[in-house]
Amino acid sequence: MPPTDGPAGLGVYANGWFKFVNYKPDDLHEHAAGTSTLTHAWGHPAMPWLKPLPEPVPKAGNFLTFIRHENVLGAGIQGHSQVRTIIKNLKPGKKYSISLYGASSIGIVNGLTTQYADAIYILTTGTNVGYAYIDLAGLKAQWKHRILTFQATGTTATFLFGCLGPGGSLPKQYYYYGHLFVDLDSLQEI
């Protein structure tokens, strides 16, 4: 599985990672994704995190960031971005483990303070898992480690990541920033 460390930037991704687009048109603001640093969204000096993130592992690099937007007053307007990667050369029937780190941060979007996401969801194809998540409830700018085990059902598997808010009837617009860090050699055959 490719690591997430790459150059920071909006719409910029480490090798092997892509934005999953299922909205037409792909509105950059509502469906923003890219690579961030521990201190700034997309590495942009004018977009600091309210609370910088610690390193998920020693000497960690940059990580992927994706958003979810909910506007409960505006007829249920929603938008979200997702990132994906494809793992190749798997052995059907073999079991694997992936070491993943998820987090959420607060930033400022259009003058509105964002909220912490409650989870990072994981959708897979080519595995026996289908759906999983990294629970972030109660964590504020802290990384949560999750080892995801799966059995390959083919020679390739797709992994799609996004974030979830707490849901419910909230009184205004909310944005959630979700983060994913994958280190080098995080995929292991078990």
Image (tube, helix red, strand yellow):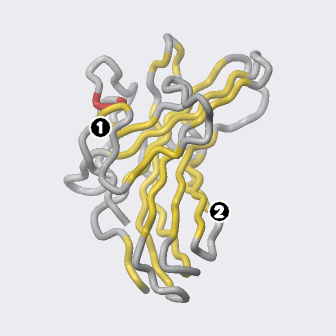
Checking the image for residue 131, the label placed there is 2
Checking the image for residue 66, the label placed there is none
- Residue most extreme to the bottom: 93
Q: Is residue 58 left or right of residue 142?
A: left
Amino acid at dot 1: Thr
Q: Would you call the spot at circle 2 few (<14 residues within 10 Å), some (14-19), or many (20 or more)?
A: few
Report the residue at 22% width, 56% height from top. Answer: 58
Q: Quadrant of the C terminus?
A: bottom left
- Examine the image and state in which quarter residue 184 appears: bottom left
**Image coords of residue 70 (percent x, y):** 67, 27
Q: Quadrant of the N terminus?
A: bottom left
**Image coords of residue 160 (percent x, y):** 54, 55
Label located before the other in sequence (2 or 1): 1
Report the residue at 35% width, 68% height from top. Answer: 186
- Tally the marks: 2
Q: Would you call the spot at circle 1 few (<14 residues within 10 Å), some (14-19), or many (20 or more)?
A: many
CA–CA distance between discs 2 and 1? 27 Å
**Image coords of residue 44 (percent x, y):** 29, 25
Report the residue at 28% width, 50% height from top. Answer: 5
Checking the image for residue 37, the label placed there is 1
Depth check, mark 2 against mark 1: the one in front is 2
Q: Secondary structure at mark 1?
A: loop
Amino acid at dot 2: Tyr
Report the residue at 20% width, 53% height from top. Answer: 59
